[in-house]
Image: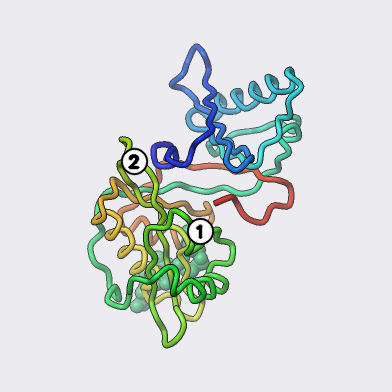
Amino acid sequence: MLLGDRVRWHDVELVTEPDDVDAALLVAVVREGRTTLLGRGDPDGVVRLVARRVAGLSARGAPALVDWMSLPRGVVVDEPTLDASGLAPFSTWDWMVTDEAPARVPVEDAVVPLDPTVDADAIRACLAESNPGTTAQPTGPDEAAWFGVRDGAVLAGVVGAARRGARTPGALSWHLHGLGVRPTARGRGLGAALTATATRAGLAAGASWVSLGLYADNDAARRIYRRLGYVTEGEFASFGPPGARRPPT
Ligand SMILES: CC(C)(COP(=O)(O)OP(=O)(O)OC[C@H]1O[C@@H](n2cnc3c(N)ncnc32)[C@H](O)[C@@H]1OP(=O)(O)O)[C@@H](O)C(=O)NCCC(=O)NCCS
């Protein structure tokens, strides 16, 4: 996850325990003036790192406010730390990855590549009905590909993929996002077919792995991903500004 995301880090601070750098890691990424914290490793250790960062900033009279924070699930963050960070609990979510091409699934013949520019309005219309909470945008700067299933003039379902990094500089991974099937078209295999096609396309394009994120309570999506070979590599609790409606991209 960190290896994939680091191509987007230009301004980053790493916080570790001086005497145990392997136990827990906190990454503070500044993007467009907004700070996002991402913790990995031992939950108690990560919480200590968050508290230490807040205390260090406060001691220097600097604001400890962050825009978003994802920590290993199971963390208990105390109220003063959340208040100083300007955060409230937002969601629980999982990170899944595969590096093996899935076998073909039924109805994959219906899946076609989309043009993220020409089909942008149709993709947005499909997402507005099928996955209104997504932050995925067909015209985003890192988009690698979009796929869809056409139903006359509209799209019954779509999925997109963004380019991310991998283990070595210049290496590539794909991150799937914006999977949505219109409610009337669900339960016919389209979600699985879209995900299988996009996963295989990413690996064929040279991605070292394909990743995706899902809310922890999305069992319907998790069953599809598991059947296609995805494994859970991280379980997170995330925190955002009070009243936030969606996470950052
Ligand atoms: C998650 C989502 C994309 C799944 O789309 P879908 O097209 O219904 O997915 P599928 O049809 O491939 O699979 C759904 C179920 O239908 C079953 N199914 C597939 N084809 C079938 C068929 N011909 N007959 C009967 N059942 C079938 C699948 O086995 C699966 O069963 P399961 O729930 O027991 O695992 C869709 O529910 C959706 O858009 N949800 C809202 C947005 C969302 O959550 N996106 C994912 C974000 S991570």
Q: Quadrant of residue 191?
A: bottom left
For the image shown, how many numbered marks are present on the structure? 2
The residue under label 1 is which amino acid type? Asn
Please tell me whether mark 1 sits on a helix, a strand or a loop: loop
Q: Which mark is residue 235?
A: none
Q: On the image, numbered disc 2 is attached to which residue?
A: 166
Up/down of 7 relative to 19, above or below: below
Q: Work out how far the residue at label 2 is from the one at label 1, CA to CA, in angstroms.
A: 27 Å
Q: Looking at the picture, how far across and down is residue 92, in whole percent? A: 57, 47
How far from the left and from the top, in percent, is residue 19? 49, 11
Task: Give the quadrant of ligand 1.
Answer: bottom left
Mark 2 secondary-structure assignment = loop
Q: Is residue 231 above or below residue 114?
A: above
Decide: few, some or many residues near mark 2? Use Cα within 10 Å; few <14, some 14-19, many ≥20. many
Q: Which residue is mark 1?
A: 218
Residue drawn where x is 45% and y is 64% of the image:
179
234 vs 164, nearest the viewer = 164
User: What x and y, as percent, mark residue 89?
Assistant: 67, 44
**In terms of depth relative to the viewer, which is nearer, 176 or 73?**
176
Q: Residue furthest top?
A: 19
User: Tag 1 or tag 2, which sits nearer the N-term?
Assistant: 2
Relative vertical location of residue 154 with respect to residue 161 in this rendering, above or below:
below
80 sits left or right of 222 in the view: right
Q: Is mark 1 within 8 Å of ligand 1?
A: yes
Q: Is residue 192 above or below residue 82?
A: below
